[in-house]
Image (cartoon, helix red, strand yellow):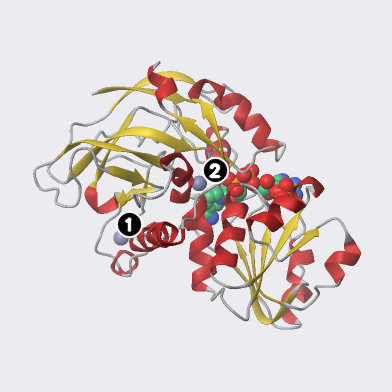
């Protein structure tokens, strides 16, 4: 089926309209008319080939939410008219040890991501949510709580799960002091989740103007990371810090804030390597870790938690045609706190 989309044709070309092909739903597939798609900084890294792994053209977008328009004959969990969502994962081998643990993002045969992966159906690459519809196996399609505003729920599919997963894995909760570095798309959900899970939540930001928002979103304390005295007051006190920063920054400065056996988890992916001093890790004994989105069951659990606690993202709704400006604003940390594309603009 010909499907309207927006794509980057090269690392330096602005995103522009492109017609792509979507398969007709197979027996286990759900076809979704996309209503909203969030704009993740990974979309920008990938469209500009900043990680050196992009095949062009690329249709970004992995915070996809819409309404089911068709279902295959074997689909049991969705019917036409339901709200449904697709995140970063659209398939995996389903049998390896990672898939068996519900950690499909770490599939040993290679997870199939919503864009830029080998698409075994088409023989080309998968295409993401900057498009009018997507077809996805129901096993990788998520249920959306009915009480959430769909536009504000879309970014939960990446910004939400990517912060939820490390916060829950590393035990953010009552009695724990948890830091979130960066108040962007991921960071603002990290602050909301750390607070909702009951942790003492500290936001680290480079943007003085975001301090009040940080508190409103759930931070108990806000530290301007360029203020060395304010940073020093927290030395050796954190149980967990989740770092969402997308560009070069000083990891040693955050490792110094960890208590014995505490962990700094990187979720941000700066294109260049970030150096670390051995001393920052060895005394006191500290952990440096990373985390990639979350598995399908975990993503559904996060969505259900958001429904139960009425948690959604702070967004600025844009038209598809504004995407190139949105990327430039994201690079200036000028987004409160996630751009979401109203996909009706693609059809109009
Ligand atoms: P974003 O909305 O642009 O937020 C990034 C934030 O980092 C900015 O708002 C800013 O916060 C801070 N920042 C930016 N440049 C900085 C610098 N030079 N020094 C210090 N702080 C800086 O991006 P996002 O969508 O949240 O994504 C963040 C990163 O996570 C990206 O690299 C993205 O690719 C990655 N990501 C990873 C996963 C995963 O599974 N691991 C999933 C999704 C995204 P302040 O203004 O508050 O300082
Ligand atoms: Zn993302
Ligand atoms: Zn697998």
User: Would you say the beta carbon of the disc 2 residue lies within 8 angstroms of ligand 1?
Assistant: yes
Name the element at disc 2: helix
Residue 52 in view in this figure: yes
Would you say 13 lies left or right of 35 here?
right
Would you say 338 lies left or right of 213 here?
left
Residue furthest toward the right? 229
Q: CA distance from mark 1 to mark 2?
A: 22 Å
What quarter of the picture does the C terminus occupy?
A: top left
Residue on which the image places disc 2: 42
Residue 244, x across and y down, in percent: 63, 55
Query: Closest to the observer: 42 or 133?
Result: 133
Would you say 67 lies left or right of 175 here?
left
Query: Closest to the observer: 246 or 334?
Result: 334
Name the element at disc 1: loop
Query: Which residue is found at the position 63% from the left and 78% from the top?
Result: 176
Would you say 171 lies left or right of 102 here?
right
How many C-alpha atoms fall within 10 Å of the one at disc 1: few (<14), some, or many (≥20)?
some
- 340 to 209, vertically: above or below: above
Residue 16, x across and y down, in percent: 49, 19
Query: Which residue is found at the position 44% from the left and 58% from the top?
Result: 306
| Pointers 1 and 2 in contact (C-beta within 8 Å) | no
Residue 247 in view in this figure: no
Residue 181, x across and y down, in percent: 69, 58
Question: On the image, which quarter does residue 126 sit in?
Answer: top left
What quarter of the picture does the N terminus occupy?
A: top left
User: Would you say the beta carbon of the disc 1 residue lies within 8 angstroms of ligand 3?
Assistant: yes
Residue furthest toward the top? 348
Question: On the image, which quarter does residue 318 sit in?
Answer: top right
Q: Which disc number belongs to residue 109?
A: 1
Q: Along the polypeptide, which appears first: circle 1 or circle 2?
A: 2
How many C-alpha atoms fall within 10 Å of the one at disc 2: few (<14), some, or many (≥20)?
some
- 335 to 100, vertically: above or below: above
């Amino acid at each position: 089926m010909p499907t309207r989309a927006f794509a980057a044709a090269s690392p330096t070309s602005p995103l522009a309209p492109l017609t792509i092909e979507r398969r007709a739903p197979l027996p286990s597939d759900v076809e979704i008319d996309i209503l909203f798609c969030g704009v993740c900084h990974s979309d920008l890294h990938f469209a500009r080939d900043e990680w050196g792994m992009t095949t062009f053209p690329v249709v970004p977008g992995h915070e996809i939410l819409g309404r089911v328009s068709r279902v295959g004959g074997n689909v049991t969990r969705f019917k036409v008219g339901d709200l449904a969502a697709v995140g970063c994962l659209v398939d995996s081998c389903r049998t390896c040890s990672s898939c068996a643990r519900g950690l499909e993002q770490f599939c040993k045969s290679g997870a199939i991501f919503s864009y830029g992966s080998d698409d075994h159906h088409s023989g080309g690459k998968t295409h993401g949510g900057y498009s009018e519809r997507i077809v996805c196996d129901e096993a990788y399609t998520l249920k959306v709580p009915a009480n959430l505003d769909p536009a504000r729920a879309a970014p939960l599919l990446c910004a939400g799960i990517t912060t939820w997963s490390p916060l829950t894995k590393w035990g953010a909760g009552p009695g724990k002091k948890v830091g979130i570095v960066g108040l962007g798309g991921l960071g603002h959900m990290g602050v909301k989740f750390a607070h909702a899970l009951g942790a003492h939540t500290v936001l680290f930001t480079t943007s003085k103007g975001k301090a009040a928002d940080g508190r409103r979103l759930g931070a108990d304390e806000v530290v301007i990371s360029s203020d060395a005295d304010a940073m020093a007051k927290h030395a050796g006190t954190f149980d967990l810090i989740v770092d969402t920063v997308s560009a070069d920054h000083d990891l040693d400065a955050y490792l110094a804030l960890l208590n014995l056996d505490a962990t700094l988890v990187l979720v941000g992916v700066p294109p260049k390597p970030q150096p670390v001093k051995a001393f920052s890790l060895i005394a006191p004994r500290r952990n440096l870790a990373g985390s990639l989105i979350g598995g399908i069951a975990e993503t559904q659990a996060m969505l259900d938690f958001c429904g139960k606690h009425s948690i959604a993202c702070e967004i600025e709704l844009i038209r598809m045609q504004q995407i190139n400006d949105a990327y430039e604003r994201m690079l200036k940390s000028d987004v409160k706190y996630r751009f979401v594309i109203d996909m009706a603009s693609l059809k109009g």
